[in-house]
Image (spheres, helix red, strand yellow):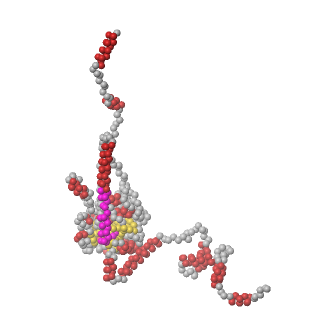
Amino acid sequence: MTAPYMCEPELIAATENLLPDLNNDLILAKNFLKTQSAATGDSLYDHMVDLVHKILTTKPPDVVDNFEQYSWGVKLDKFRPNFDLLNDVYLAPQQLATVRLQEEMYRLVASKNEKMDGMGEEEQELDLEEEGGTARIADLVEHNYYFREAGYGLPARECFALFIAMKMLGIKEPVSNVRFFGKIFGTKQNYYVAETDLTLEELDRRIREFEMKDMPGEGDMEEKEEGAEEHKELVGEGEAVIEDKEPVPPKLPPVPEPTWQVPPPIPVERPGQGVNRKVYWVCNVPGEAWTCLPDVTPDQIQVARLTVRCMTGYLDTEIQTFPPFEGTERNYLRAQIARIQASTSISPQGFYTFGSGEEEEDIDLEEGMGDMAFNPNPYYRGHTIKDLLDPDMRYWVHHGRYILQQGRTIWWNPNAGMDEALEEEDDELPPPIPPETGPSLMSPLSEDGRVEGLRAWTAQKSTVLAPERAVVTLRSNVWPGAVAYATDGKNSECMYIGWGLKYQPPNFSPLQLPRPQEEYPVGPEVMEMQDPSFADEEAYRIARLPPPIPELPGEGAGEGFGEEGDEEDD
């Protein structure tokens, strides 16, 4: 039986009576969109996916108005060769990581300030007591303004980021004062250096740790003495055994012994004293975590004075110099900072005053007068611009402690322990060593030496058009990059921005290797003898010949008697 023939109206009616299937319709529509073009092999579905992805990634404005251009651009991108990947690889700019670090830093400081603003005065005091107080941050923005008036200083953005980073340092670390020391350039990265004072609790903790450690060299000397005694005992026991079992060896001349002795190590100044009075923190980018530099030792300062080396920007870099330097770049950086701080910390006369308000802390009687405390003078009224520009530098003083040749600010007597031991044994005391001395605190700049015929400091005025707004700056000729400013009011500060290198004359040459030392004194007992000649050898042989055997008295008579007897027999 054949199927009945249906007219077009009947087909339309039959189709309308069927229920719609959404999944089936979507599949049919998707298959239609995926129909590939016979010319290019592309489909409308893939083209729309690429177009929507590009629009959502770039998020351009006015997409509807330029929709055709974006569609045309997607088509053009497909005709690029496969090896051209420049537009496909996204390279983040170098500043992106810095911006993210600084954004996090800004949020941390802003949340801290908002928290303090939302509290009352009593709540703020209680919060500060629980946190151990808040650190005093030097106003870097204000100081940088005066430095820039004279042509120095940092860019505005960099300065503000550093100021917020110093605030973050005061929030996270146990410090009481934070001051920007300077910026030290490196071959790969730069160092931003912050100078701080520790809180009393943190300082006491570090002093206890320092006292618990053995002073460098004391334990080594005791071990050497014990090892020498054991060696003597072993040698004595061995000699006794040799005498019992073996014949006595021939007597030989004594073995020469060296007369050179290892000098005693110079002790390190404890935290909060001398070159370690301040604690320094460094970072490569404002917003990074601050790294605390270790305390500096006298040996490191002595070696740093004999070498010239640029920083790399990485604290763990190995230092390869002669004489050899003990430590990495973090130790070398700390030694250079100590030298710069001692030489370039200057201020107008009267800006600082001795004493901290507590008589016990003013002078350390055990260590002498070389480590006195000083603080800003509240009664300082400033000097005139004319006085600050005085070419004799009588109105400028050093407030940095002078570092002696020992590498310390307070002289240490190497014979102190030796004298006491010799007095107990009633031995002859060694000749006394004269103590090293240097310029005292607050000594005027007029006592500084000269560099290539120039003074150690060069003074200049920022402007001559407005004397009431002029700023006097002093630039160091010994440490290029060290600058200090002062106004006719109460503002003064010093800063270092440079390579961390001292001025060197053009004919500088590094330290050469020393000549080999004599192991023992040269004398006849160790000198080579001249070979004897043949005549000397013959004379020596004849002199050593045995004496001839003497004849007996009856030997000649017996022989004659025998001969006569023989004749009689005949």
Q: In the rendering, at what x and y percent does residue 277 appear?
A: 30, 67
Q: How many marks?
A: 0
Q: In the rendering, at what x and y percent does residue 271 appear?
A: 31, 66
Up/down of 133 relative to 498, above or below: below
- In this rendered view, identify the residue nearer to me: 414 or 237: 237
- In this rendered view, identify the residue nearer to me: 398 or 292: 292
Residue for point 41% across, 64% down? 314
Quadrant of the rendering where the C terminus is positioned: top left
Q: In the rendering, at what x and y percent does residue 191 appear?
A: 39, 67
- In this rendered view, identify the residue nearer to me: 355 or 475: 355
Answer whether residue 340 is visible to the viewer in this image.
no
Q: Which residues are magenta?
A: 195-222
Answer whether residue 125 is visible to the viewer in this image.
yes
Q: Is residue 70 left or right of residue 273?
A: right
Residue for point 66% across, 73% down? 41
- In this rendered view, identify the residue nearer to me: 546 or 407: 546
Residue for point 31% across, 69% down? 205
Up/down of 23 relative to 348, above or below: below
Quadrant of the rendering where the N terminus is positioned: bottom right
Q: Is residue 464 shown in magenta?
A: no
Residue 36, located in which quarter of the rendered image?
bottom right
Q: Is residue 209 shown in magenta?
A: yes
Residue for point 38% across, 68% down? 291
Spot the residue most to the front.
569
Q: In the rendering, at what x and y percent does residue 351 appear?
A: 27, 71
Up/down of 552 relative to 227, above or below: above
